[in-house]
Amino acid sequence: MANQTVQLGELLASAGASVTLIQVNPPYRPDWVSRFPVVRSLFRLLPYWLALWRAANRSDIFHIMANSGWSWHLFAAPAIWVAHFRGVASVVNYRGGEAGDFLLHSGGLVRFSMRRTRALIVPSGFLHAVFTRFGMRSEVVPNIIDLARFHPRSMFRSGPPNLFVARNLELLYDNATAIRAFGLVRQVFPDARLTIAGSGPEEPSLRQIAIELGLVDAIRFAGRLGRDAMAFEYRSADIALNPSRADNMPNSLLEAWASGVPVVSTNVGGVPFIAKDGANASLVPVADPDAMAQACISLLSDPALWRKRAEAGLLEVQRYTWSRVEPVLRETYERAMRLHSMGK
């Protein structure tokens, strides 16, 4: 979501908009604050809320990136209310793959805040269906992929297989299953490599799994990468794995497709709304390393299938370019500001 936010800001600016980005997790100042859990939250939240209040002075519209859980309550909801009290139109861009569970418990609070907004946009039909189920109207505005940054190196693979995962190291994204699947792939392709780009609390346990499976020398934990470094990693990959247990519209799939890299993903949440099993992706059950490994082995063993899947991904990703999304987003902004000026 952070990368999408930065990219959207750049694209809006290139289209002539004046854009102010307000970060929810800037570095702590002073540094020692980070050692005290409750205090550090205040040192981050208060400046954030103040920045929202100030930004309203020079804004026609708030574009609020929202997620589930505490992220909604601490960051999205306050932005909605600041916009409301300062007389600024607001559009909520909701992206949480766990929206169903979150709305089941907090739907009343979300609806209460959402009545102060002018539009709710979501990146996939999956989230549109979730919000409809909870009585909230939404419209689909897809994620955007930068084809100038993410592009293929070749439509033919060569050399030792290189598998790539671009999900944070959290339980939700189940990198453990990707590592176990990779271990099975190595039994067929002993020179295969795995790169995991991301950071998070599960790193120690994931490294331990790699040790137990004898994969330490074959796995690289690359940490959190910037967009250019991420694009380079995709161009070096032969297969992109998405082992997530819950998901909405993972941008990692779009980045892989744009890079000419076949995708093997779990069949969860919003994934089947954009990825079709056997056409532009291989979709497998959650927490099933055997199925994930077999899908990888099938692609790596059949050059024609690998190329066909890569070409299908490149064709699919054309739907998510700025030229396709910008008119939809522009119309949403204009309608939101028009409704706001009419007091509706």
Image: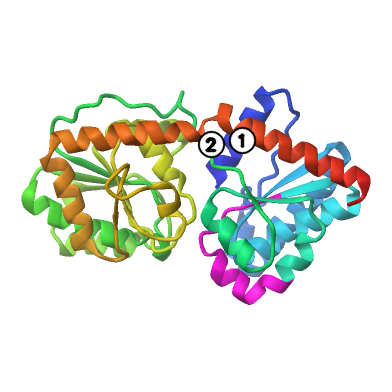
Please, is residue 12 above or below residue 120 in the view?
above
| 107 on left or right of 211 | right
> What is the residue that sits farthest to the right in this orientation?
342
Name the residue that disc number 2 marks. Answer: 144
Mark earlier in primary sequence (2, 1): 1
Q: Between residues 176 and 311, which one lies in front from this camera angle?
A: 311
Residue positioned 69% across, 39% down in the render? 21
Instruction: Report x, y in % for residue 5.
Output: 60, 41
User: Mark 1 belongs to which amino acid?
Assistant: Leu
For disc 1, the neighbor class at 10 Å (few under 14, some 14 to 19, many from 20) is some
For disc 2, the neighbor class at 10 Å (few under 14, some 14 to 19, many from 20) is many
The alpha-carbon separation of the residues under discs 2 and 1 comes to 8 Å
Name the residue that disc number 1 marks. Answer: 8
102 inside magenta stretch: yes
Q: Between residues 24 and 105, which one lies in front from this camera angle?
A: 105
The residue stretch that appears in magenta? 92-108
| Residue 228 lies in quadrant | top left
> Disc 2, disc 1: CB below 8 Å?
yes
Q: Between residues 47 and 245, which one lies in front from this camera angle?
A: 245
Instruction: Report x, y in % for residue 74.
Output: 69, 62
| 18 on left or right of 208 | right
Please, is residue 141 above or below residue 133 in the view?
above
SS at mark 2 in the image: loop
| 239 on left or right of 339 | left
Q: Can residue 182 be seen in this view?
A: no
